[in-house]
């Protein structure tokens, strides 16, 4: 199982903020991961956008990066507080 | 020094406490951001702020380290809210202390620009017509770009 976290507006698209899901064999890196997630959640490209950054196990990664079962994978749309 | 709080805080009290530990500084600058009661001409009823620990904390601590390395600061304080807030509540407090005013002003400005555009937060505004996720404005990114070295 991989643990997915969808932050900000992405949770509205996927319907949940935190999801546990096994990775299919075809998903080995962030590129195949994005395509699979976008299709699974019918996100119409929202999860493919380069403004959406990925953090794996609490570290923002330079893509493409490998993904594995048991990873915590966070999808992060543009950030900003204040 | 940095705190992420899920409960309201009193910025006047935060400033009072800050002033007791400024290490002999001659200049103190503080900024408080409040939840606005309206946006784009319509009333705002609430604001929700989401963080991702430990990324949010690590990023802010690193920004404080950068500010401390760039300006001669004797003290820095950052408080940021998360969770549900109502209009008028303080969302962010930044205070800096230095021997002279310029460094204190610039460091506080730098930290606020970081918090607005790079700190790991997601912000949702609720109004009469529903909820919207808010992203930084282009002006916020332009402000942030002023500090590129």
Image (spheres, coloured by chain):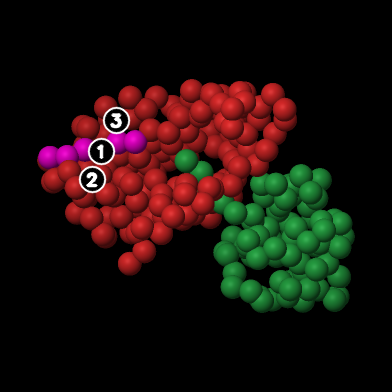
Relative side of A23 to B67, left or right: right
Where disc 2 sits, the SS reads: helix
Q: Which residue is drawn at 30% across and 39% down?
A: B95
Instruction: Answer whether labels 2 and 1 touch (C-beta < 8 Å).
Output: yes
Chain of residue at mark 2? B
Q: In which quarter of the image is residue A1?
A: bottom right
Chain of residue at mark 3? B
Where disc 1 sits, the SS reads: strand
Residue neighbourhood size for the residue with mark 3, other residues' Cα within 10 Å, grouped as few (<14), some (14–19), many (≥20): some
Q: Residue at x 51, y 29 (%)?
A: B35
Residue with the mark numbered 2? B104
Marks 2 and 3 share the same chain = yes
Does label 1 or label 3 sit earlier along the sequence? 3
The magenta segment? B26-31
Residue with the mark numbered 1? B29
Task: Identify the mark at residue B15; answer none if there is no mark.
Answer: 3
Where disc 3 sits, the SS reads: helix
B104 or A21: which is nearer to us?
A: B104
Q: Where is residue A18 in the image (x, y as percent from the top left)?
A: 74, 49
């Amino acid at each position: 199982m991989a643990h997915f976290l969808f932050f900000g507006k992405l949770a509205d698209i996927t319907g949940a903020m935190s999801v546990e899901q096994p990775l299919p064999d075809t998903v080995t890196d962030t590129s195949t991961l994005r395509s699979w997630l976008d299709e699974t959640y019918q996100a119409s490209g929202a999860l493919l956008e380069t403004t959406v950054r990925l953090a794996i196990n609490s570290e923002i990664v330079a893509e493409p990066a490998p993904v594995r079962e048991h990873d915590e994978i966070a999808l992060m749309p543009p950030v900003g507080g204040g | 020094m940095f705190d992420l709080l899920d409960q309201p805080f009193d910025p006047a009290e935060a400033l009072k406490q800050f002033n007791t530990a400024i290490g002999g500084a001659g200049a103190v600058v503080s900024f408080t951001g409040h939840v606005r009661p309206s946006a784009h001409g319509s009333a705002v009823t609430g604001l929700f702020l989401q963080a991702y620990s430990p990324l949010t904390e690590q990023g802010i601590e690193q920004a404080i380290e950068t500010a401390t390395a760039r300006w001669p600061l004797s003290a820095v304080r950052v408080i940021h809210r998360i969770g549900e807030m109502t209009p008028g509540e303080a969302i962010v407090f930044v205070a800096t202390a230095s021997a002279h005013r310029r460094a204190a002003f610039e460091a506080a400005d730098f930290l606020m620009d970081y918090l607005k555009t790079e700190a790991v937060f997601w912000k949702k505004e609720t109004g009469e017509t529903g909820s919207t996720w808010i992203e930084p404005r282009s002006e916020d990114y332009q402000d942030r770009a002023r500090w590129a070295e």
